[in-house]
Amino acid sequence: MDEVLLVNEVGPRDGLQNQKVLVARSDKLRLVRALVDAGVRSIEATSFVSPKAVPQMADADELFPLLPNAAQVDYSALVPNLRGLERARAAGVREVAVVLSATETMNQRNINMSLAQATAVCAETLQGAVGAGMRTKAYVAVAFECPFEGPVDPAIVLALVEQMVRAGAREVVIADTIGAADPRAVAKLMGRCAREWGADRLSAHFHDTRGFALANAWAAMEAGIRKFDSSLGGMGGCPFAPGAAGNLATEDLVLMATQCGFKTGIDLGLLRVAIALAEDLTHRKLGGRSAAWLDKQAQLQPVAGAV
Ligand code: COA
Ligand code: ZN
């Protein structure tokens, strides 16, 4: 089998936005370069949000035009509204993502809008992006459980996905923002979404709060999903969602997918180099579930690219 699994690296956005240390633009570029060197070809690089809401992303306008290997890498950016879209367009962004949370309270906390307002703003932003010839993605956040309102009815998620698709989202990312989903819930929801809109149109975004991220990714793979968000070293969280721990670690996803016969194009040895850099930049120990095993393999074969 050499089926492709597409890894969309979200460390530079979802990972960094939550870090206390402000990372310099030149260091962000070094991190992205290290990811590209490791073979990553799809990266959510930044967000064009209010700098007051997320100070770490305040340099998006200057950062984006400097991203390396722009012809070979699919870079995307998150935009919360038309203002963000305009900034992204001016910076040369070719793919934007909007974020719609599935509950009232989460939209309030994240973007200061009601669910209805957020749905309308996401729809107008998507339409604007399509009009500007950009590729489009919509996140449905807290798709399984909301930190404020509890479990989310799958019927609500399905309805929001439909509205985003109608508004022009080429892809919809089902996001377990606080890492509360379990494999059975994932199989059910992703299965229903895949039957409704086709697996090609969908992607999944998991957090590892309860240690289920990899199991959830496998459940989504069984439902036919072949595109996943993940973050190097599991770096991440959400500043607006209490309890959201790190993301599904890219190295865990790549290791599992590769061992199961999928191709990701990502070299784990070189990915470890990028993770070490991210640790330096954030002053934190990073690493997914496979960290100890990968370290051991690297000691046995201390050649970059060998693991
Ligand atoms: N980029 C930069 N600045 C923006 C902006 C954008 N996309 N959208 C709004 N602003 C500015 C406004 O100009 C205003 O500036 P001022 O205070 O200097 O006048 C300020 O932000 C507030 O704007 P307002 O329209 O009143 O929005 P708000 O305060 O209700 O904030 C968002 C709404 C969406 C802009 C803000 O909540 C946000 O950026 N959230 C992003 C959250 C996020 O990134 N979450 C993680 C990803 S899931
Ligand atoms: Zn996330």
Image: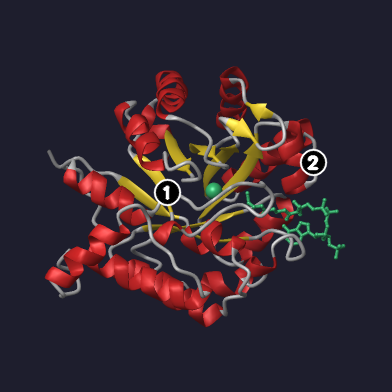
Look at the picture and state if 253 lies above or below 39: above
Label annotation for residue 35: none
Q: Position of residue 51 (x, y in %)?
A: 73, 66
Q: Is residue 10 left or right of residue 91?
A: left
Against 192, is 31 above or below?
Answer: below
Of the residues shown, which amino acid type is indicated by label 2?
Met
Q: Which mark is residue 113?
A: 2
Q: Nearer the viewer, residue 222 or 98?
A: 222
Label tally: 2
Residue 5 left/right relative to 86: left
Quadrant for residue 20, please give it.
bottom right
Q: Residue 15: where, in percent of width, then height?
A: 52, 60
Vertical comparison of 209 with 91: above or below = above
In percent of the image, x 69 and y 58: which residue is there? 49
Circle 2 SS class: loop
| Residue at the disc numbered 1 | 248
For the N terminus, the quadrant is: top left
Respond yes or no on whether mark 2 lies under 8 Å from ligand 1.
yes
Q: Which image quarter is the C terminus in? A: bottom left
Residue 100: image location, x then y, percent: 65, 38
Against 226, residue 297 (above or below) is: below
Residue at 63% of width from left, 21% of height from top? 156
Decide which of 265, 289 is in the foreground and name it.
Answer: 289
Give me the residue at 59% from left, 38% from top.
141
Q: Residue at x 77, y 64 (%)?
A: 52
Q: Is residue 69 visible?
A: no
Disc 1: residue Cβ within 8 A of ligand 2's nearest atom? no
Of 115 and 85, nearer the camera is 115
Where is residue 74 shown, x and y percent of the image? 41, 57
Q: Secondary structure at mark 1?
A: loop
Mark earlier in primary sequence (2, 1): 2
Seen from the viewer's position, the closer of residues 105 and 29 is 105
